[in-house]
Image: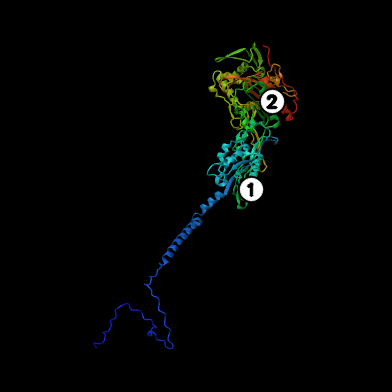
Amino acid sequence: MSDREPPRRRVPGPSRPVRPDARRRPAPGARPGPGARPARRPAPARGPAPRGIRLASPRPRLRLVGVALTLVMLAFVVRLLQVQAVDASAYAAKADQNRYVGRTLAAVRGEITDRGGVELATSVDAYDITADPTLFTPEATKTPDAPAQAAALLAPILGQDTAALTAKLKTPHTRYVLLAHRQTPQVWNQIKDLKNTLAAKAGTDRNTVNVLAGVLAEPTSKRVYPNGDLAAGILGWVNADGKGGGGVEQQLNKELAGRDGKIRYAQSGGRLVPTAGSAETPAVAGTDVELTIDRDIQWAAQNAITEQVRKSKADRGYVVVQDTRTGQILAMANSPGFDPNDLSRASPAALGNAALQDAYEPGSTAKVMTMAAVLQENAATPMTHVTVPNRLHRGDRLFADDIDHATWYLTLNGVLAKSSNIGTILAAGQLGKTQEAANRVLYSYLRKFGVGEPTGLGFPGETKGILAPPGKWSTSQQYTIPFGQGVSINAVQAASVYSTIANGGVRVEPTLVRGTKGPDGRFTPAPKPEETRVVSAKTAKTLAEMLESVVDDEQGTGIKARIPGYRVAGKTGTANRVDPATGRYRGYTSSFAGFAPADNPRVTVYCAIQNATKGSYFGGQICGPIFKQVMEFSLKTLQVPPTGAEAANLPVTFTP
């Protein structure tokens, strides 16, 4: 066994896997037997096999994306629920606010007519020019200065300042601003034409912007006065807010104004969306007012007083015409006046109605009330003899008549005819056993005639005059009040005194409104005025005869008031005037009051002129002719027949 080589040891190494089909390798050089698989080519030598890249699992990422999408969708769902369910009404209201706009439908103001239905104040179509400031922003117009451009175009049309219009168009946080009140249709047509021109250019030229797209108009009405300044003091005016600013327009504003309506509609870009629906409350038209005045008589009175005020270079004057039977005011004229169509040219002093708003001392026209008291109290008769000296000492003063004279021997009728202050003081002293008692009696009659009391018209700014209780009369007032100094009245009160005598001693409260006509066309007469008996019919008739002596007798002070064919009863007045600016006496109040026909009275006319500075200042000289002119016209207008009976012709003087 020694000659044999020792067996080789197998070095341990990596074992190779045995291929399943490798049974036995054929010996080198041996041919494969029948059916044997051909031998494979030896594999090229390889190095160590590389390690493979393993990808992370995609599931976590998919889960993260899914969670994120879920949260986003959940947020959308929550927000959708909030908008559509929780806050749905709030968002709907906000959308409506931006989409829907509302405006007032102005009611048509009622007309004011004279007693014959002639229009004195009426309303015509007009437009309020408005704008939506949100349509003038740079975002809406693509132009930085759209408000300024629009204002420059509108200013000359509206007659307004460019800067002020620019500021309005820049108003923040609003969709409505008012640019101009109550413009005529012509003004709105000018703006519309300009808007259309700009819109046409903007459609063809991208560089052109319609800066007026946000300018709109609301239909309304404008007050006009067809007769200009005629009866302006009675009518008043309507202010920029459409409310009465004076006169009947203010007094009856609620009835005239009616009730405004409302409309709410959808709009887009300043234009109505007709298919979006609207809600409307219709306006109710105002009530028409029919006054008692007659336009023609008002015209005659206004012309007469205006001309005399101009000639006399007076401060002002008034004429009141009244129906003696009904108390209705047929005319109430003031000079100077104003045109309610254009208040910019009116003098502040001329606004209002001076015939009702001025309180002044009437002077001798008030003597008729003293004589009424004397006759009614049976203290004297028209034939009672009154010796009138040149001067009369009473209290702390010496009293005189308007002219120096020797002793006059007058009847009581003559005292009134010659308008003697001294004779009136003597007659008034017979009203009581003492001066204090006489004062109380006279005071009671003055109040019955309406002195110191409202006229009953309820007119804005009306004065009731000044009449102190008799216990507060000063020493001089005890003797001046009987002849019309120391007491104040207005022109309508003065006219009412004479209408009371003309109406048989019954005072009928003055009226200015004859009735109203509602939207249904039905006429409603004004309430019947209050009536008060002041003196008996006998006393009134006697006073009327005494007042005729003032006009008919050659010694009377009212001869310039004579009217051929008619008996006229009247009285002149010339009183010291209290200057409203200083509170002291300066100038005179000249007046004339009377009625006709004296035997069957129909019309009272009262005229007063304040502070005449040229020519005569005596009432009979400057107011007597006005009385005649206005009275003649009124009698003809009312078709009052001439007087048939002769005047009484009571004596004025007596022989001592």
> At 66% across and 13% down in the image, what residue appears?
409
Image coordinates of residue 80 in percent, x first then y, are 50, 57
- Which secondary structure lies at badge 1? helix
Task: Inspect this view and state whether residue 62 appears.
Answer: yes
Quarter occupied by the N terminus: bottom left
Residue carrying label 2: 304
Along the viewing direction, whichever of 207 and 469 lies nearer the viewer: 207
Horizontal relation, residue 312 to residue 175: left or right: right
Q: Residue type at mark 1: give it.
A: Gly
Work out whether 473 lies above or below 86. Answer: above
State the residue lying farthest toward the front.
3
Work out whether 116 lies above or below 505. Answer: below
Query: Residue 203 got which mark?
Result: 1
Along the viewing direction, whichever of 225 and 40 lies nearer the viewer: 40
The alpha-carbon separation of the residues under discs 2 and 1 comes to: 63 Å
Give the image quarter of residue 591. Answer: top right
> At 54% across and 18% down in the image, what residue appears?
475
Give the image quarter of residue 345. Answer: top right
Image coordinates of residue 223 in percent, x first then y, are 64, 37
